[in-house]
Image: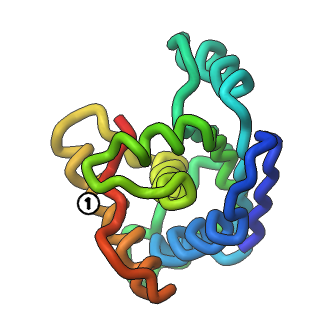
Amino acid sequence: MSIDVNNESGTEVDEQAILDIARYALARMRIHPLSELSVIVVDTDAMEQLHIQWMDLPGPTDVMSFPMDELRPPAKDDEEPPQGLLGDIVLCPEVAQKQGEEAATRHSMDEELQLLTVHGVLHLLGYDHEEPDEKAEMFGLQAAIVDGWRAEHGLTGPSPAPTVS
């Protein structure tokens, strides 16, 4: 799996954890190991510009996903996953910091960025949360991936609750 993490935000983030959880999520979703993903970490000004340009919504947001080849997880266990470019995930640590502080289960900016990375991966794979049934599926999968990754890395305590809307 080729995953690039590029921090353009000026904020120190745990880039290795972002890389690790993205790799874990893609493996768990059975995405071809030669697929490519880019994660870009930006400041609030850059995120706000992207949010306005692509979503026509004001202010910065936490995460945005820009799919390329529209890869999807294989439907069957014996199906060979396609290889390709997943796309870009853009994260904003300043928004993540605020969300982590305001979450029901208060957590760090880095924990929020890990959650948002998984959220972004799922969006790249075609998951959405506009409808209640879609939200239940996506957020359930997101929690399972984050919990699995945390357990594999010996991290204790409650996983961050979904704070993305």
Q: What residue lies at 68% left-to-right and 48% top-to-bottom?
A: 87
Residue in the foreground of this view, choosing between 160 and 26 = 160
Residue in the foreground of this view, choosing between 156 and 91 = 156
From the viewer's perspective, is 160 left or right of 35?
left
Residue 115 appears in view: yes
Image position, residue 119 (x, y; %): 46, 51
Q: Residues within 10 Å of mark 1 (few under 14, many from 20)?
A: few
30 lies above or below 111 = below
Tell me the SS state at disc 1: helix
116 lies above or below 42 = below
Residue in the foreground of this view, choosing between 45 and 70 = 45
| Colouring of the image | rainbow
Residue 121 appears in view: no
User: Considering the image in quadrants, where does the N terminus appear?
Assistant: bottom right
Image position, residue 97 (x, y; %): 53, 44
Image position, residue 46 (x, y; %): 73, 25
Q: What residue lies at 79% left-to-right and 49% top-to-bottom?
A: 7
Say which quarter of the image contains residue 165.
Answer: top left
Residue that label 1 marks: 140
Residue in the foreground of this view, choosing between 40 and 134 = 40
Amino acid at circle 1: Gly
Image position, residue 14 (x, y; %): 68, 64
Q: What residue lies at 74% left-to-right and 53% top-to-bottom?
A: 12
From the viewer's perspective, is 34 left or right of 103?
right
